[in-house]
Amino acid sequence: MALTQSWVMWDERYSAYDFGPGHPMHPSRLDLTHRLAADLGLLDHDDVLVRPARHASDEELLRVHTIDLLEAVRAASADPGSAHGRQGIGTEDNPAFAGMHEATTLAVGATLEACEAVWSGQVLRACNIAGGLHHAMPEAASGFCVYNDIAVGIQRMLDQGAERVVYLDLDAHHGDGVERCFWNDPRVLTVSLHETGRALFPGTGFPGDIGGPRAQDSAVNVALPPGTGDEGWLRAYQAVVPTVVRAFDPQVVVSQHGCDCHYSDPLAHLSVSMDALAVAYGWVRELADDLAGGRWVSLGGGGYQLVDVVPRAWTHLIGVVTGRPVDPGTATPDSWRRHVEQTYGVPAPEVMGDRGGREIRYGRWEDGFDPEDPVDSAIMATRRAVFPGWGLDPYLD
């Protein structure tokens, strides 16, 4: 039997994380992803282990969150009607629901298991599509996120001796909660590639936000203009991420892969294709392989086009994590399409990509930048803000 190289965290109980009918963050996106990955055969290999989730304990949550938040979530779990916005619970974004605490601690526990296993060397790579809840703050729920599984998982690795963890956030929304948790901790480099906060929730994540006084240049924010497409998005990644992460020299990579940057997402305004998302997943794995001995924890996040986008995107992610990347020209399985049509009454996408094989041309930053181009201007603002602190030249490196 081959050595297990990858864990895919999965639990049918993930469906309990449900804010109710009409809420954008519906658990169907997780079920459809797992079904698609399974139907494509990505999980049926000796070197891949599908692992169940566990609940995070209060002690584990309190390494990041306040007791006030835990008490508010528990109260809302027991009596959803009693929640009136306390600690961000019972709002339009974060409606209270019965069992909220248990459902959320399951997602956190799965990320904890993944982080513990990767950091200890039990497994090289792990993926938890139910994780990536990057907006939750230490003291409050925010932006569909109750507890911050990412911050709790990273904190566990720090507690176990990690000295340099890079957190890479590719969601359309700024990874504000994780950044806040480690704002003053030089052991964690947070890098967020997102739509500018001038146009999108949470309204933060500007180039000048570079970390606290004890951790200057440990926060890297690339704030892209609305409408940024494949070429600009991939160009921004290549112009910032590999260079600054290499300077940081991480021991482990943790990444969040919200796919709401896709052009059809209803809540954001970027214009990225499935094909470009798949390219970026491969780049993150290469980064982990080159700089962190392959140690990589990958997580889900945002993404609110529940049938056409999220399942395909995160199946591409699972393919990269398990060492079997899916060609965007691959047809989606008949069994999966039938399930979509019978269950949801809508047609399912027929192929795993969007571009029909058309090449993505994003250019090389070292060939020069165009100051009149809004994407290049956004990239340069970030490079000027953080590169000098790492001994890098914003123009040449």
Image (cartoon, rainbow, N blue to C red):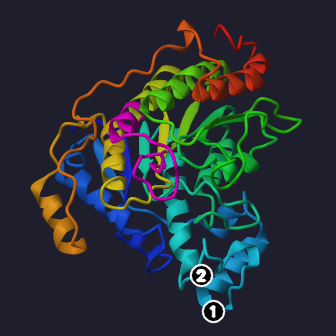
Work out whether 172 lies above or below 334: above
The picture quadrant where one finds residue 245 is top right
Q: Main secondary structure of the magenta part?
A: loop
- Magenta highlight on residue 296: no
Q: Amino acid at mark 2?
A: Ala
Answer few, some or many: residues within 10 Å of disc 1's Cα (few below 14, many 20 plus, some between 14 and 19).
Answer: some
Q: Quadrant of residue 390?
A: top right
> How far separated are the C-alphas under marks 2 and 1?
8 Å
Name the outermost residue toward the right. Answer: 213
Q: Amino acid at mark 1?
A: Gly
Mark 1 highlights which residue? Answer: 81
**Do we see residue 162 in this rendering?**
yes
Report helix, strand or loop for mark 2: loop
The magenta-colored residue range is 257-280
The quarter of the rendered structure image containing the C terminus is top right
237 left or right, relative to 340: right
Task: Answer whether labels 2 and 1 touch (C-beta < 8 Å).
Answer: yes
Question: Which residue is at 25% across, 72% downward?
Answer: 344
Q: Is residue 140 above or below residue 97?
A: above
List x then y, in percent, for residue 333: 14, 52
- Using the image, tell me which numbered label, if any, was put on residue 96: 2
Q: Nearer the viewer, residue 220 or 24?
A: 24
For residue 43, above or below residue 362: below
| 249 relative position to 287: left or right | right
- Taking the spot 53% from the left edge, 28% from the top edge, the residue there is 237
